[in-house]
């Protein structure tokens, strides 16, 4: 097997809102996440709106109110 073929795995802390929620191995020492299983609506049973990457804002910027007023009935 070749030496140095794979990146080195180091202990990694998964962070959610500044708190450590999980520890694992990764090539990075810290990973910051927006959603994890402890707050995900599927696992908690709570309804919660998660707008990833500003999709709603992007849609509104592109179409505005014309989408609702000009659609065919």
Image (cartoon, rainbow, N blue to C red):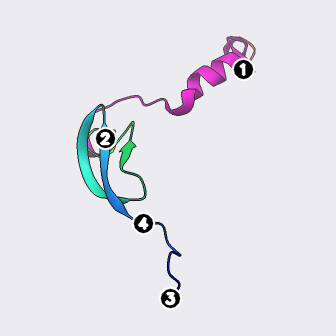
Q: Nearer the viewer, mark 1 or mark 2?
A: 2
Most frequent secondary structure within the magenta stretch:
helix
Is 68 left or right of 35, judged from the image as shown?
A: right
- In the figure, residue 8 lies in which quadrant? bottom left
**Residue named by callout 1:** 62
- In the figure, residue 33 lies in which quadrant? top left
**Residue named by callout 2:** 15
At x 59%, y 20%, the residue is 57
Mark on residue 1?
Answer: 3
Q: Are marks 1 and 2 in contact (CB under 8 Å)?
A: no
At x 25%, y 53%, the residue is 23
Disc 4 element: loop
Mark 1 packing: few (<14 Cα in 10 Å), some, or many (20+)? few
Q: Quadrant of the C terminus?
A: top right
Disc 3 element: loop
Of labels 1 and 2, earlier in sequence is: 2
Q: Position of residue 4 (x, y in %)?
A: 50, 75
User: Image height check: is 30 above or below 3?
Assistant: above
Q: Are marks 2 and 4 in contact (CB under 8 Å)?
A: no
Query: What is the residue that sits farthest to the front in this orientation?
Result: 3
Mark 3 packing: few (<14 Cα in 10 Å), some, or many (20+)? few
Q: Nearer the viewer, mark 2 or mark 4?
A: 4
Q: Are marks 1 and 3 in contact (CB under 8 Å)?
A: no
Q: Position of residue 10 (x, y in %)?
A: 34, 60
Q: Nearer the viewer, residue 32 or 72?
A: 32
């Amino acid at each position: 097997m070749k030496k140095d073929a794979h990146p080195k795995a180091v202990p990694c802390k998964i962070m959610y809102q500044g708190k450590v929620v999980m520890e694992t191995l990764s090539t990075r020492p810290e990973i910051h996440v927006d959603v994890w299983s402890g707050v995900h609506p599927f696992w908690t049973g709570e309804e919660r709106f998660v707008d990833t990457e500003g999709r709603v804002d992007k849609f509104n910027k592109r179409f505005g109110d014309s989408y609702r007023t000009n659609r065919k009935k």
